[in-house]
Image (cartoon, rainbow, N blue to C red):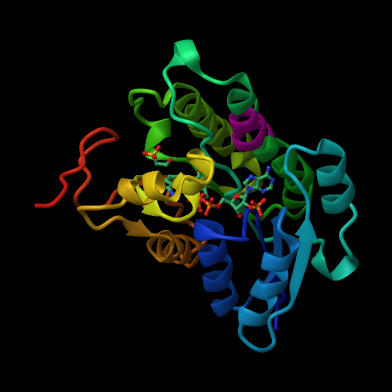
């Protein structure tokens, strides 16, 4: 049987982990990345029998590590069929006039530049083979802007634009490029945004039913199982209680 390989960045939690597990169920061998090695090792234990997992620990901001690891993959892992650019987060939720420049650096360096480094390491192989699927996890924050979302929204607008650019440039190679833009998904996202403040993070998901990481994974599963002539180019997915980036009906 043909060996299928998926690379998922940010597979240590939330959307990335759920995507990795659903792809494993669809018989993809997995290259999974993140900074927390213990979580990657745990993921190895959760995949169905017969699925191989190559865990790679690196920070997507570390350009040298990204290229060293991804351009020198062991032979059986070289032909990546699916790349899911998922690693990312928000850092802080402050008005622009008092925003923290370290937070700004983190969001632009991880969400935008990290996605570019990983893509740059993987795309040449896809071009050579004239096949592949790239799924970039954007956000409703890449389609709209909300109060205090300034730089996070900027980073996700950049992801949206880069995704569209990739789709145009890679079109001659038959590479599918997909943007998935979720609204509120209950993951560790808010815990990271609020720097470990559990109460504040939990409040984001109270009073309505948010999306789950599994909901996004099921969309990924649907996308990768379309026939060769079909690409779901641009998908916005919201919890039913959410009408826009700023309007969530709570305690209905
Ligand atoms: P989580 O915090 O649960 O997961 C984030 C993942 O990204 C983790 O696996 C983390 O791994 C990885 N990551 C973060 N920073 C780095 C880094 N510097 N280097 C390598 N990996 C990194 O959040 P989500 O699952 O919610 O987020 C996944 C993606 O979905 C993000 O791009 C986010 O912007 C996007 N998104 C989330 C929404 C939500 O409401 N939750 C909605 C719309 C989009 P580790 O810490 O081990 O490095
Ligand atoms: C995460 C969703 O609305 O918190 O990208 O920005 S939101």
Q: Nearer the viewer, residue 17 or 201?
A: 201
The residue sitting at the top extreme is 97
Q: Is residue 170 left or right of residue 139?
A: right
Q: Is residue 239 above or below residue 24?
A: above
The answer to whether any part of residue 179 appears in the image is no
Q: Is residue 39 left or right of residue 71?
A: left
Q: Nearer the viewer, residue 67 or 125?
A: 67
The residue sitting at the bottom extreme is 49
Q: Is residue 165 above or below residue 118?
A: above
Q: Position of residue 228 (x, y in %)?
A: 52, 61
Q: Position of residue 54 (x, y in %)?
A: 77, 68
Q: Nearer the viewer, residue 7 or 11?
A: 11
Q: In the rendered image, which quarter is residue 113 located in?
A: top right
Q: Is residue 17 left or right of residue 199?
A: right
The answer to whether any part of residue 86 appears in the image is yes
Q: Main secondary structure of the magenta part?
A: helix
Q: Nearer the viewer, residue 21 or 28?
A: 21
Q: Position of residue 15 (x, y in %)?
A: 50, 58
Q: Quadrant of ligand 2?
A: top left
* Magenta stretch contains residue 108: yes
Q: Is residue 219 above or below residue 247?
A: below
Q: Which residues are magenta?
A: 106-113
> Which corner quadrant holds the N terminus?
bottom right
């Amino acid at each position: 049987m043909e060996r299928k390989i998926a690379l998922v960045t940010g597979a240590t939690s939330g959307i990335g982990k759920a995507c990795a597990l659903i792809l494993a169920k669809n018989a993809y061998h997995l290259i999974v990345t993140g900074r927390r090695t213990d979580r990657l090792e745990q993921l190895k234990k959760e995949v169905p029998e017969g699925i191989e997992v190559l865990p790679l620990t690196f920070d997507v901001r570390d350009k040298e590590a990204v290229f060293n690891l991804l351009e020198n993959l062991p032979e059986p892992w070289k032909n990546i069929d699916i790349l899911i650019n998922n690693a990312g987060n928000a850092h802080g939720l402050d008005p622009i006039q008092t925003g923290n420049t370290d937070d700004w650096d983190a969001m632009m360096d991880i969400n935008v530049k990290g996605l570019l480094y990983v893509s740059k390491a993987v795309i040449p192989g896809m071009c050579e083979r004239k096949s592949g699927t790239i799924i970039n996890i954007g956000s409703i924050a890449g389609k709209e802007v909300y109060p205090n979302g300034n730089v996070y929204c900027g980073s996700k607008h950049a992801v949206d634009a880069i995704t569209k650019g990739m789709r145009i440039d890679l079109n001659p190679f038959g590479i599918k490029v997909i943007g998935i833009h979720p609204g509120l998904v209950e993951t560790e996202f808010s815990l990271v945004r609020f720097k470990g403040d559990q109460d504040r993070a939990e409040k984001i998901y109270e009073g309505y039913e948010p999306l789950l990481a599994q909901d996004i994974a099921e969309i990924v599963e649907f996308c990768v199982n379309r026939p060769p002539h079909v690409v779901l180019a641009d998908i916005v997915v919201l919890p039913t209680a959410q009408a826009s980036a700023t309007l969530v009906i709570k305690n209905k």
